Structure formats: C-alpha cells, structure tokens
Image (tube, grey):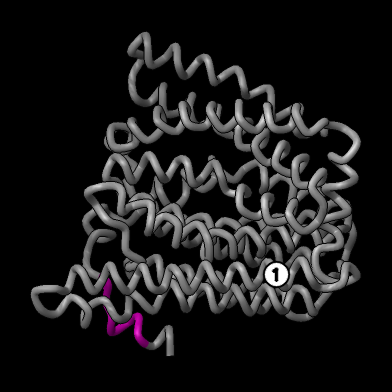
Amino acid sequence: MSSLLNVNLLLVFVPLTLLARAAGLGDVAVFLAASLAIIPLAALVGHSTEAVAARLGPGLGGLINATLGNAAELIITFFALRQGLVELVKASVIGSILGNLLLVLGLSLLVGGLKNGTQQFDRRVASVNATLVILAFLALAIPTAFDEGLLTGSEGAGRELLFSEGIGIVMIVLYGLYLLYTFRTPKDTVGQDVQAEAHETHADQMPMNQALLLLAASTIGIVLMSESLVGTVEAVGKSLGLSEFFIGIIVVPLIGNVAEHLVAIQVAHKNRMDLSLGISLGSSLQIALFVAPVLVFMSLLFEKKLVLVFNTYEIIALATASIVATLVSQDGESNWLEGAMLLVVYVVFGFGFFLLPEAATHAAPHRSLLLPLIR
C-alpha cells in the first residue's frame, strides 16, 4: 500500500498535462507530463481491478483481473491505432513482452537473490508458463514467416489480414484454455500466491462500489492522458531524436506497465518468487495471447489495419527473450546472477533499438532469417 501511495504522488501530472495542452507549452512538455500521469493511473486501475476480483472470488475475479490487467496499454494502443501509428503499436506489443521477460524478471531475480540468496519456486507452474511463452513466440512469428507467400497475387493483402485474424482467434482460445487450467487446478499449485496476495491486500480495504468508482475514474484519466501522449509521439520523436520504433518498443511499455513491474520486484524481495514469476510470465502471456489479437480486431475500426507481421529485429529479440526466460525458469530455483544476465540482454537490445534508424525498422522482414527461428 505504501508504494501505491508513493506512486500516487504523480497524479499531480494529470491536471498539469491538461494545463500544458491548454497553454500550448509544446509537445515535449505534454508528452512527459502525460507519461508521468499514466503511471499512477495504471496503478489505480490495477489496484481497483484486484479489489473487484477479490470480492468476486477466484473464478470470475481472476478472469476480470486477467482481462483488465493491461487496460492502460490497450487504451494507449487504441489511440495509436486511431492515429494510424501501426508500427508503434506492434513495437509496443513486442516491447511489453520483452520488458516482462527480461527487465521485470531480471530485476525480480536480482533484487530477490541479493536479499534472500537462492530462491525456490514451483517448478511445475513455471514450466507450464514458460512453455506457453515459447508457443506465444511461435504464434507471433509464424505470420511473419508466411507473409511473403501470402502477399503473392492481387488478393495478397486480404489473405495477410485473414491469416492474422485466424491466428488471433486461435491465440485467444489458447489464452482462455490457459485461464481455465489456472482457475481449475488445485490451489496448492497454480495461482495460490496470486489469490492469497489479492485477498491479503484488498479483501478488507475497499468496498465494491468504491472499487468500481475508482476503476471508472482512473480509466477515464488514462483515456485523456493517452490521447495527449499519442498525439505528441511523432513531434517528440523528432525533437528528442528518438525513432517511433524506439518509443514504441521501450518507452510506451515502460509507461503502461511500471506499476505492475514494481509489484513483481517487491514480492521477489519478500521471497515470494511464485507470485513474482506469475506476474512477469503471466503478463507476457496476456500481451501475446490476448492483447495482440484484440488489437488486430480493434484495427478493423480504422483505415490502417494491424497484421501480426513484425520486422526481423522484433522477432530476434522476442525469440531470445522467450528462450532465455524459459531456461531461467525451468529448474525451480533462481539467483541474482540469473537476474543480472536477463538485464544485460535487455540493455543490449535497448541500445540496439536506440541506434536503429527509422528506415531500417520499416523495411520488409528478412524471411530467410526468420524461417529457421520457427522450425
């Protein structure tokens, strides 16, 4: 609760963002203020969602929590799609997965290992999540590998979109099966720590009507701030020398998920690695298997359609993160060195993304390089 109160101090940037827009203080000022404002609003969405989930029980409550867990990012990407920033949206999907698998998991293992030494966690649960992470990578990579063939002929664009829609439906079904398995498996294995934490933190602290009111207010706040944020992305990129790709793959995921990241690190510090891994791996799965397909169907409302075709750099980064995170989580124990290794991988990719010119990220994927990755 104390960390939530500290983050809430950033709520002052909500009115400051509106004032900056009204006063015409410039795109950079609006972008920075909106970014800082979204952080506490996303935390409040998560806090109120967990409170509602705790009141509804583990079944329905868990489903609501899983569905609304990335509400902030969905709202941000909705406005980006409306602006036609499809490449930024795709980069933010990959960036969110990378952030959870490398940055969040890495910091959790590092902080938890330095505080508690070698930490133990449920190997069976971690193995299920890690296997799904690999499957999620394959599901996102396969449309890219098939894209060149699908685009052959006059109706190629239609086939490309149809394939992404079909893959999206399959991914959502797989995510539903994952949730069903999680909720119906005995509590001594999957989800015990998550349910205990939610109950411990929220069950006796927030009435249902107050939680719903907070959820509605914070969601409206994110809508307003996201509109301000996305509306300044292109101008800010030019002013600060940042590519749209870098903003999408590094900056946007950090803004939308920082509150959830802090929770994962805090519980690792408390030696609750099952919950910490559940947050980092579970959030990655939610982005890959639920948020990405939803964005495909959401883009049908706009002129520019989103297809699950990514550039080579995104696919290589996703493959690396999936494999490394799986290897780390397979043995049922962790230490600070493993966390440091994950962080090194994230920093290396971040540095590369920063140096990549914009033109390189919009180039057609090198399918000859992608095909070996999915075999």
Q: Nearer the viewer, residue 263 or 210?
A: 210
Which residue is at the far left?
154
Q: Which quadrant holds the N terminus?
A: top right
Which of the 4 image quarters holds residue 161? bottom left
Position of residue 322 relative to residue 16, above or below, is below
Q: Give, as a three-letter code, the residue at label 1.
A: Leu
Q: Which quadrant holds the C terminus?
A: bottom left
Q: Position of residue 348 (x, y in %)?
A: 49, 61
Q: Can residue 76 be seen at all in this image of the molecule?
A: yes
Q: Is residue 217 magenta?
A: no
Q: Position of residue 319 (x, y in %)?
A: 49, 75
What main secondary structure does the magenta stretch of the protein show? helix
Q: Position of residue 48 (x, y in %)?
A: 71, 36
Q: Residue at x 85, y 59 (%)?
A: 193
Position of residue 106 relative to residue 135, above or below, is above
Q: Is 120 displayed left or right of 172 in the figure?
A: right
Position of residue 243 relative to residue 167, above or below, is above
Q: Identify the element where label 1 is drawn.
A: helix
The stretch in magenta equals 365-371
Q: Which residue is mark 1?
A: 180
